[in-house]
Image (cartoon, rainbow, N blue to C red):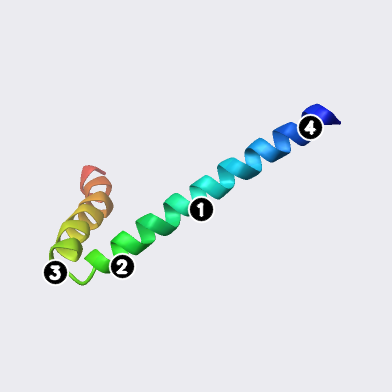
Amino acid sequence: LGDEMNELRQSQMALVDEMQIARREIAELSSSALAPAVPEVRAPGVAGAVQAPGRAE
């Protein structure tokens, strides 16, 4: 049980770290989303990713 408890604690701490990183990324994205450059960069990438396989077929 001791080993399992340690593993649970480690995975819980890793999840907390990931949540903090995700919150930071969300904050950065939401603040930079106000800048027009972000949608311009994203949209072509998404459209290209969607269209390319269709054209290849």
Answer with mark 3 or mark 4, whichever residue precedes in sequence.
Answer: 4
Instruction: Count the numbered circles shown.
Output: 4
* Element class at badge 3: loop
Question: Which residue type carries mark 2?
Answer: Ser
Disc 2: CA contacts within 10 A as few (<14), some (14-19) or many (>=20): few
Q: Quarter of the image containing the N terminus?
A: top right
Per the image, the residue denoted by label 2 is: 30
Residue of label 4: 4
Q: Depth-wise, is mark 3 or mark 2 nearer the camera? A: 2
Residue at image location 22% in from the left, 47% down from the top: 52
Compared with 33, 13 (above or below) is above
Vertical placement of 8 versus 33: above or below? above
- Which numbered disc, 1 or 2, marks the residue that appears first in the sequence? 1
As rendered, which of 42 and 1 lies closer to the eye?
1
Q: Which residue is the site of mark 1?
A: 19
At label 3, which amino acid type do we have? Pro
Q: Secondary structure at mark 2?
A: helix
Q: Are marks 4 and 2 in contact (CB under 8 Å)?
A: no
Q: Check residue 36 in the rendering and tell me which mark sits there, or answer none.
A: 3
- In-front residue for pair 55/3: 3
Q: Residue at x 58, y 46 (%)?
A: 15
Looking at the image, do the residues carrying marks 1 and 2 touch, with CB atoms under 8 Å apart?
no
Q: Residue 47 sits in which quadrant?
A: bottom left
The structure residue drawn at horizontal position 38% and vertical position 56%, both measured from the top left corner, is 24
**Label 3, label 4: how many angstroms apart (C-alpha)?**
49 Å
Q: Position of residue 17 (x, y in %)?
A: 51, 46
Q: CA distance from mark 1 to mark 2?
A: 16 Å
